[in-house]
């Protein structure tokens, strides 16, 4: 047993932390305010190799592992959760299913440019009437000669509009319910593909979230991912790993808020002493720090399991559940430590608090995680 | 990063698990009625469990600290009482002699303790001195080749049953904490009196007593460390002690969770439909997630300690978190059982009562928060 990170992991942490502090943090508030996605930041991440951390070099990645990837998401989210989710959706939701289920041609054609950061990836599963219940989806695909024709729309698409490559799920045989779903790789330039309304959101505002629309969208048959009917399996397995990326994002948000709260509590003086000298504050910080540590260990454990090729479904559901809840709790408390200043946009903690909320919702709501965990408990 | 145990650790854990099931479980009722489990202690001695992390040259098992922590966890899953008896005996009853003892002291006491011929105890707490150890009132005055010790100690785990006691007394009251010294005191020492047994909410069967020292004459050879080093002796094993209690809390929580899960499964298999609801399922999911988080905090602290790396903050976090979730999870376990959980026919009410002390002893959780926040 060894809880220490390897030199390689420590190096990735340092690289990403430096990058996050120098390049991401200075504009984080402004981009949040303006709901502005900055593609140059993505390109800079590409230069550092961050856009393909877990993928082998033959597919344009840096050949590291899921733990390194989680560390990167954590460090980015520590200053800006929007950048965190951009990379997470790109890697876990778009890259992963192509890496796991794609043909060699698909990997070279799509995974490589994504890993190298020349293309951005996105994932299209959710629909207005189909969130946690994927089998209720209305987007359809039908075979037409050498192509598939997609019709319908998807909502809440992270990286929507900015992405070049979308992994999309559509129903081919409704009578088979979830076994009738297939997965496709759709390029933004395909005829019949368009980007719809952009959501205005509570948090992660500089990460675009849009609707994507398919109107007789023609997808060549070599862009079917896996076999026909594999879609549901691909979608669920993708979310299993993806949710640990969100756990890492939540850990980063919580750590960012904790750091800010500690620094402020030491520097802010009231009644002639720093406010951290009051147990009302210092005990709160101790509880926050303990929660963040526990969340981080759960997240690293799930990432380690996945890197080892061991089952990680329950571990990642637990990490997402715990880290998401911790991020929410810790950011609320961080605002409390700041008092009135915490409520203003002069400090980042209100942004952390808004950003934290989504980690309890996306890539499987907390309620879905509890369903996953309790099923494993009572069925095993 | 490598998060699995060695094969040796796994095998040892399994052996302790089996021992607890076979030997301790049948004895639970007697402990609940207040009987000290002398029989179990003797059996643990035969199994080599009384000196798990003590080097073989001193009669111990020579296993690593992680194995010791796994043993505390496994024993506490069946009986938190056994967990604390072993934890006090090892972490604070034996270890200080190993770290600070002279060759003669080690030779004289450790093999007996490690083999379980002797049981160990630790006497720091006094009526007016709990978390604030420096304010203790027990006095030791040197007379020739002896010390004369006067004072009283309370909440002494294993008190009365133990053969050796690490006793803290001030040899120089003006010097505050720098005036505290530690002594190895045998139960048969003239002037050593065993007072009343505390009546406790939980940990039944584990003895918790008051001790009074009346002109107790202790040989200068039994001074542990140097004069004035007592505080150092007391805090050196703090981390190990805290991680041990964290493991006890973890064991309690894990056991309560397992009982709740199997109760739900059983009710469902017999068709009691009222329990097949998310109200119960989601509760179990939260409990399991918290237990998993506690596990990682405890094992991480144990790993750091076993490598000799600094772990004050990590040990405190493990103790704080594991004890809090032990309280939470045992409370929830009773809720899952409903009225059955309130009855002594099921073990969850015992886990619930036993959990509370883990938030209090080996440094209250308030002390843990002070330790953590000072390091932020």
Image (tube, rainbow, N blue to C red):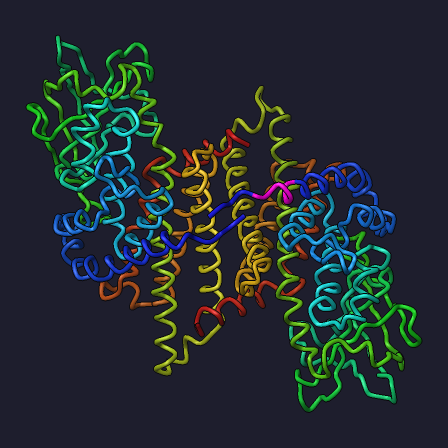
The stretch of residues the image draws in magenta is A5-10
Residue at the location (88% across, 89% down)? A145
In percent of the image, x 87 and y 51: which residue is there? A39
Query: Which residue is pictured at 34% across the width and 32% down the height?
Result: B237
Answer with left or right where residue A342 lies relative to residue A109. left
- Tell me if I can see residue A271 in this picture: yes
| Of the pair B337 and B143, the residue shown nearer to us | B143
Q: Nearer the viewer, residue A138 or B110?
A: B110
Taking B36 as reference, is A320 left or right? right
Q: Residue furthest bottom?
A: A175
User: Eyeballing the image, is A103 above or below A257?
Assistant: below
Image position, residue B346 (x, y; %):
26, 65
Residue B202 visible from this viewpoint: no
Decide whether the magenta segment is chiefly helix, strand or loop.
helix
Residue B211 is left or right of residue A78, and the answer is left
**Residue A241 position by quadrant:** bottom right
Q: Residue at x 86, y 84 (%)?
A: A147
Residue A172: % across, % down: 75, 86
């Amino acid at each position: 047993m060894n809880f220490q990170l390897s030199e390689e992991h420590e190096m990735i942490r340092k690289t990403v932390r430096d990058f996050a502090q120098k390049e991401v943090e200075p504009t984080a508030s402004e981009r949040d305010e303006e709901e502005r996605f900055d593609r140059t930041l993505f390109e800079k991440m590409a230069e550092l190799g961050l856009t393909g951390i877990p993928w082998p070099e033959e597919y344009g990645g840096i050949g590291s592992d899921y733990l390194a990837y989680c560390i990167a998401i954590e460090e980015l989210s520590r200053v800006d959760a929007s950048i965190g989710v951009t990379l997470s959706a790109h890697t876990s939701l778009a890259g992963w299913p192509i890496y796991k289920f794609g043909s060699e041609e698909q990997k070279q054609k799509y995974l490589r440019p994504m890993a190298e950061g020349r293309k951005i990836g996105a994932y299209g599963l959710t629909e207005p009437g189909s969130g946690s219940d994927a089998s209720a989806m209305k987007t359809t695909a039908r075979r037409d000669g050498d192509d598939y024709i997609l019709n319908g729309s998807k909502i809440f698409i992270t990286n929507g509009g900015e992405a070049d490559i979308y992994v999309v799920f559509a129903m081919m045989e409704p009578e088979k319910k979830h076994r009738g779903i297939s997965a496709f790789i759709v390029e933004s330039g395909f005829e019949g593909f368009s980007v719809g309304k952009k959501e205005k959101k509570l948090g992660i505002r500089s990460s675009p979230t849009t609707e994507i629309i398919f109107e007789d969208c023609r997808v060549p048959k070599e862009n079917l991912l896996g076999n026909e009917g594999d879609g549901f399996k691909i979608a669920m397995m993708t979310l299993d790993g993806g949710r640990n990326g969100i756990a890492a994002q939540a850990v980063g948000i919580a750590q960012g808020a904790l750091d800010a709260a500690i620094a402020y509590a030491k520097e802010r003086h009231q009644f002639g002493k720093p406010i951290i000298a009051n147990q009302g504050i210092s005990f709160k910080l101790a509880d926050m720090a303990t929660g963040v540590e526990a969340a981080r260990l759960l997240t690293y454990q799930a990432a380690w399991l996945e890197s080892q090729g061991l089952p990680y479904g329950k571990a990642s559901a637990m990490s997402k559940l715990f880290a998401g809840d911790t991020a929410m709790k810790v950011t609320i408390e961080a605002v409390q430590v700041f008092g009135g200043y915490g409520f203003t946009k002069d400090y980042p903690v209100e942004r952390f608090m808004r950003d934290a909320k989504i980690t309890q919702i996306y890539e499987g709501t907390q309620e879905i995680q509890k369903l996953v965990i309790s099923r494993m408990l009572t069925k095993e | 990063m490598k998060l699995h145990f060695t094969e040796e650790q796994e095998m040892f854990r399994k052996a302790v698990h089996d021992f607890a099931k076979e030997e301790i479980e049948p004895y639970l009722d007697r402990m609940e009625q207040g009987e000290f489990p002398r029989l179990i202690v003797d059996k643990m001695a035969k199994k080599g469990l009384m000196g798990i992390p003590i080097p073989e040259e001193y009669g111990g098992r020579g296993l690593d600290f992680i194995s010791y922590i796994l043993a505390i966890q496994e024993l506490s899953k069946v009986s938190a009482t056994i967990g604390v008896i072993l934890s006090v005996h090892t972490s604070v009853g034996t270890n200080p002699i190993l770290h600070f003892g002279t060759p003669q002291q080690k030779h004289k006491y450790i093999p007996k303790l490690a083999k379980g011929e002797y049981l160990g105890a630790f006497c720091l707490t006094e009526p007016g001195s709990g978390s604030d150890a420096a304010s203790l009132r027990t006095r030791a005055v040197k007379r020739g080749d002896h010390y004369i010790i006067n004072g009283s100690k309370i909440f002494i785990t294993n008190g009365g049953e133990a053969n050796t006691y690490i006793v803290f007394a001030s040899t120089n009251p003006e010097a505050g904490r720098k005036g505290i010294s530690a002594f190895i005191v045998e139960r048969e020492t003239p002037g050593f009196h065993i007072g009343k047994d505390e009546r406790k909410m939980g940990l039944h069967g584990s003895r918790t007593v008051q001790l009074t020292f009346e002109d107790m004459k202790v040989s200068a050879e039994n001074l542990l460390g140097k004069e004035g080093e007592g505080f150092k002796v007391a805090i050196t094993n703090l981390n190990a002690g805290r991680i041990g209690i964290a493991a006890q809390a973890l064991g309690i929580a894990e056991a309560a969770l397992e009982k709740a899960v199997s109760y739900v499964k059983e009710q469902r298999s017999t068709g009691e439909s009222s329990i097949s609801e998310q109200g119960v399922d989601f509760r179990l999911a939260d409990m399991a997630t918290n237990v998993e988080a506690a596990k990682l905090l405890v094992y991480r602290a144990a790993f750091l300690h076993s490598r000799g790396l600094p772990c004050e903050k990590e040990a405190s976090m493990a103790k704080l978190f594991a004890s809090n979730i032990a309280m939470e999870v045992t409370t929830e376990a009773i809720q899952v059982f409903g009225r059955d959980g309130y009855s002594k026919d099921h073990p969850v009410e015992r886990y619930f009562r036993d959990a509370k002390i883990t938030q209090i002893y080996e440094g209250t959780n308030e002390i843990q928060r002070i330790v953590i926040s000072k390091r932020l």
